Amino acid sequence: MNKFDYMEKHGFEQLVYFYDKTTGLKGITCIHDTTLGPALGGTRLWNYKNEDEATLDVMRLARGMTLKSAAAGLNLGGGKTVLIGDAETCKSEAYFRALGRFVQSLNGRYITAEDVNTTTRDMEYVNMETDYVVGLEGKSGNPSPFTALGAFYGIKAALYYRFGTDDVTKFSFAVQGAGQTGYYLIKYLLEHKAKKIYFSEINPKHIERMNREHPEVEFVDPDGIYNLDIDVFSPCALGAVLNDETIPKLKAKVIAGTANNQLLDEVKHGEAVKSRGILYAPDFVINAGGVINVHHEIRGYNRDNVIRDVKKIYDRLLEIFKISDKEGIATQQAAKIFAMKRIETIGRIRSNFIP
Ligand code: NAD
């Protein structure tokens, strides 16, 4: 890949490769855009096939973080780190402290956190060498309940926009995946007495937990979830679940869930969902509860303030749905315009000199 062409096309600021000769740590930090504030994004550890695969992944993820934080109203830019290695064998105190030193060398332009294959424990080691790490044990903690809470309010906003009421007792739901976020989302729906809830899962432990704790939530086969006659389909498992094969099957009138990258092709499938009359809550807007939670760690953590900010996802989505209708574009595109406009406007008001 031609990295500078890709950077120019999507407005990337910085791509940093680092290697530690003591531990063999190999990583890449990408800072996409810092107009709104320091770039924040977790550290993902993955056995990438090669350098190009890792580079493309870190750039794609960093850019996603720029949009997510901008749309969430946070003063954060987008960044990400990927480490190339085998999570089973490469982890150690020294490995993560070496990472911490590279993060510190960026002097606050980038703030890291846990992500796939890294844990709050690993971040404790990172924290021994840098101030620029969040999501630590005893601070903001597990983001999933907040991501699910944001999705719950996002679902209510979509229901209100589509049906004129956000009263969940009138609607039926299908939640795909009852892991960290799906489990909490189902809990919130039950607390608010949703009319009917189905769930699909592939992990026997998670199926058993749901059956034991909430037998009224009905299990459906993972392939069967797309055909259900329900009001809301809530993807809370994998990406790319909205595609040529699944979209024609859907009977739901609203799609709103926590999963990242739900549309296989953002433009094509965003349009396909729209043309079927389904209201899609853009993933990076509805699933921002986790980053909102972690952001509060930078400002001084207060749980009530986090909940107050997570609930704002409701109004934000209404605004995005209105842009989509006014401009005649898919909601995913409207969400991007919404995020980019904030970056441009705030960037411009900061352009004057203050002595
Ligand atoms: P998780 O791994 O805890 O849960 C996902 C669940 O989906 C698992 O239980 C898994 O068994 C199940 N699953 C996998 N394939 C499935 C299939 N084909 N059908 C039905 N179930 C299936 O993950 P999570 O933390 O709940 O995250 C879910 C999604 O939300 C991911 O896309 C993640 O990137 C995104 N997300 C999570 C957070 C967060 O705070 N955890 C924040 C933002 C976005």
Image (cartoon, grey):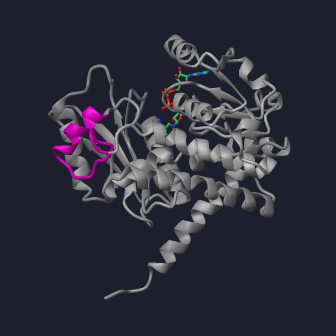
Q: Is residue 79 visible?
A: no
Please provide the residue range marked out in magenta.
120-139
Residue 320 location, quadrant: bottom right
Q: Nearer the viewer, residue 12 or 266?
A: 266
Which secondary structure dominates the residues rendered in magenta? loop
Q: Is residue 76 visible?
A: yes
Residue 132 is a magenta residue: yes
Picture layout, residue 292 above or below residue 230: below
Q: Nearer the viewer, residue 140 or 68?
A: 140
Name of the residue lying farthest toward the right: 276
Query: Which residue is pictured at 81% across the width and 58% down the height?
Result: 328
Horizontally, residue 285 falls left or right of residue 114, namely right
Picture layout, residue 91 above or below residue 76: above
Picture layout, residue 4 above or below residue 143: below
Q: Nearer the viewer, residue 16 or 268?
A: 268
Horizontally, residue 332 falls left or right of residue 2, namely right
Q: Position of residue 256 (x, y in %)?
A: 66, 40
Query: Which residue is pictured at 44% across the width and 48% down the height?
Result: 291
Q: Position of residue 154 (x, y in %)?
A: 63, 47
Q: Position of residue 33 (x, y in %)?
A: 45, 60
Please count the marks in the image. 0
Residue 241 location, quadrant: top right
Name of the residue lying farthest toward the bottom: 355
